[in-house]
């Protein structure tokens, strides 16, 4: 659900240090909000304070949010805040290296991959030509 950022109430939080938000702001500008914030039915923030603050800092006026509709007590709300932050797991060094290697291959394909892509494009164009040709022939024979 899209909500106005000004409607979100940030009460006392467990996390005191939001850290450097510059990379998160860059991510929001480039890719948008990948994971919505979580609020209760009174628009009190449960999870996503860093995302909320980064969105504010880059001038967003609204943000996607998951609204926990059922009445939620303060104990359960705090448990959700702790759980959301505690369960996050960073990539291992190996996972991160593999991800960047794959990204590099996609951004800069080998000569063989470029040739294969070029050949595929040619075959697609040939197919489109024949499809167009046969549809003209079919239309003429129907008349």
Image (cartoon, grey):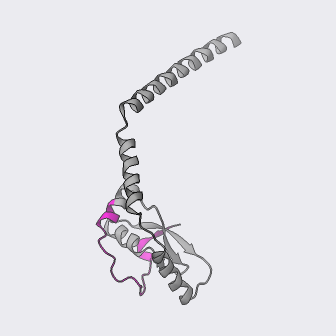
Query: Which residue is at 44% across, 73% downward?
Result: 48
Residue 47 pos. (x, y %): 47, 76
Vertical position of residue 24 compared to residue 70: above or below: above
Vertical position of residue 84 compared to residue 120: above or below: below
Number of disc labels? 0
Vertical position of residue 68 compared to residue 22: above or below: below
In the picture, residue 127 is in which quadrant? Answer: top right
Query: Which residue is at 36% across, 30% downward?
Result: 111
Instruction: Give the camera-side residue of 45 and 122.
Output: 122
Can residue 143 be seen here? The reply is no
Magenta-span inclusion, residue 15: yes
Q: Residue furthest right?
A: 142
Residue 62 pos. (x, y %): 43, 67
Quarter in which the C terminus is drawn: top right
In the picture, residue 12 is in which quadrant? Answer: bottom left
**Magenta part of the chain:** 2-26
Residue 41 pos. (x, y %): 56, 79
Can residue 26 be seen here? The reply is yes
Vertical position of residue 135 compared to residue 98: above or below: above
Magenta-span inclusion, residue 50: no
Query: In the picture provided, is 94 more to the left or to the right than 70?
Result: left
Query: In the picture provided, is 65 more to the left or to the right than 30?
Result: right
Query: Which residue is at 41% across, 67% downward?
Result: 90
Instruction: Give the camera-side residue of 59 and 28.
Output: 28
Query: Which residue is at 57% across, 17% downward?
Result: 130
């Amino acid at each position: 659900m899209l909500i106005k950022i000004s409607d979100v109430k940030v009460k006392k939080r467990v996390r005191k240090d939001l850290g450097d938000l510059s990379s998160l702001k860059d991510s929001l500008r480039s890719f948008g909000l990948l994971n919505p914030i979580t609020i209760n039915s009174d628009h009190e923030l449960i999870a996503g304070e860093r995302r909320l603050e980064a969105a504010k800092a880059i001038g967003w006026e609204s943000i996607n949010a998951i609204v926990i509709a059922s009445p939620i007590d303060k104990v359960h709300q705090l448990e959700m805040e702790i759980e959301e932050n505690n369960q996050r797991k960073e990539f291992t060094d190996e996972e991160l290296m593999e991800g960047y290697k794959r990204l590099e291959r996609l951004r800069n394909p080998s000569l063989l991959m470029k040739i294969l892509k070029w050949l595929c494009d040619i075959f697609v164009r040939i197919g489109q030509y024949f499809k167009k040709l046969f549809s003209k022939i079919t239309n003429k024979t129907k008349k």
